[in-house]
Image: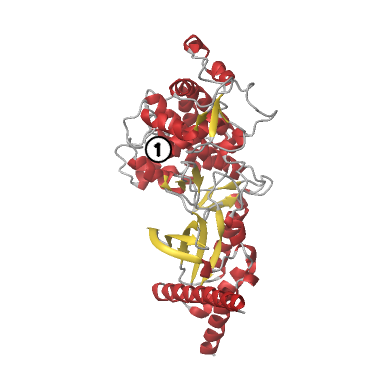
Amino acid sequence: PYFAWRLLLADTEHWRGLGQRACCLHVKFTHQFPVSEITSAEGLHVLIEMHRKHIVDFAHLNLEQRIGVGASAAVYRGTLRSKTPVAIKVYTPKEINDDVVAAFSHEAALCGALNHPNVVTFHGMCVCPPTICLVSELCRGSVADYLAARPLDAEPLQQVAVDVCLLLDAARAVAYLHSFSPPFIHRDLKPGNLLLDAGNRVKLTDFGDSRASEDDTRCDALRKMSVRGTVEYMAPEVINGKAGLAQYSVAADIYSLGITFWDVLHPTATKYPGAHHHHLRVFERVLDGARPALRPDLHPTLARLLGAAWAAAPEARPSAAKVVSMLEAVQDDVLGPLALDLSKAATYVGGGKDHFVEGAHLVDCMLDMDWVSDAFEAVRVGAALMDAGFLHHAKHARGFENGPSLYSFDEDAIDASVPLVLSSRDTVTVSSSKDTLQPARCACQQFAQGLKQTKQVHSSVQSMLTVKDQPLTLKLLEDDFIATSDSGA
């Protein structure tokens, strides 16, 4: 009997706590964001019915602090189910009409359908009258913030290695969007919409303006979209759009990606000197063929890539897949000499023919050699070494981690990359991939790219409950709807 009493008491306290937190959150949003209640209730019911599988009960959300604010939304740091750090984007439209429901339905459906290591993870949608919240993965900040804060005294080769990691992540995200049939067009690619996670991996976000490209067989009128994007990242054909309409294609994203690449590679430079960010002056220069100046020491492949990406003619720009291929070639070229230097500087554990090194030690080595400015960058460079095939996990079972996991350098890959310096190699410090337990198809590259994850139970899966299992959400919405209907009568 005592055990049963304690169990019932714990259950009561649990649900009482959820109810109190839900009511507090509901009151807070209602007071901060007043809105037409009858319109809100009707529209939100429609939204819930359309996206049941993405609904997360707001009783399981805990808002901690506001980390950003925009014209139409505020972003809060919080936790989901008291353990998963999340970013909560809170929208409070003045009226929940058909257009608003359609817009949120589009963004929720797209976010829920996307699944890629370089796209922000979507946990679900939370409806808390009069607000709509999109709950997603919590990242450290944006690439724009990162570029503004990073030191500028890194050696050229090491800085290119760090930069290429950012470019490659962004390109892979865009290539993933464009791989759909029809392809998705982001329409607002820029450093501010690229976030960085704990491993310094770039995550694409903000799909509110994304649209599916129409089939080529459709008439031109159907392929026109309203003009979206940020001025300095708009392609010429978008700027040329008449009557508020523009011809969007995947090539417009490639142009924006090229300008974003320039930002990463020239963090302190000005794109269009004298334009002073004036919209019309920027438009005029872009349409006249002007493009941001490239620094003279830029890697030649990167210079060619930027020139192709921001070509005036859309058909002259490379595909996102081609951009990824070119960046992978630059990554291999840049990381080869660094892998050799790192293999010489590392202290190995174990004996015999296999020589392994801890991930945390490699991070320390990169910091000591001033390759990177912090451990986040070091982890991303370590993942890049695995992606390029120069480094492998001891059991080929996980990506690069700043911890005790063991890794080995691939002698054959490094030899092939830097043949001119082989005579200076200390052969004791590296092990050949043939000597380790590498399977026929090594999974290290997939782990490094985030395409494969170490097996574990993801809390995000448990949180994706359908709305029929969320009694508090339904009850509050029903009460909202009944009360406003009565008042309207």
Q: Residue furthest top?
A: 423
Q: Residue furthest front?
A: 2
Amino acid type of the residue tagged 1 in the rendering:
Asp
Q: Residue at x 58, y 52 (%)?
A: 211
How many numbered marks, from 0 up? 1
Residue 288 in view (yes/no): no
Q: Nearer the viewer, residue 111 or 11?
A: 11
Coordinates of residue 56 in the picture (x, y in percent): 57, 65
- Seen in the image, is 364 located left or right of residue 444? left
Coordinates of residue 4 in the picture (x, y in percent): 61, 77
Q: Nearer the viewer, residue 435 or 377?
A: 435
Indicate whether 289 appears above or below 75.
Answer: above
Q: Residues within 10 Å of mark 1 (few under 14, many from 20)?
A: many
Quarter containing the N terminus: bottom right
Q: Residue at x 55, y 42 (%)?
A: 173
- Identify the image quadrant of residue 260: top left
Label 1 element class: helix
- Seen in the image, is 54 located left or right of residue 420? right
Indicate whether 399 appears above or below 422.
Answer: below
Q: Which residue is mark 1?
A: 263
Residue 141 in view (yes/no): yes
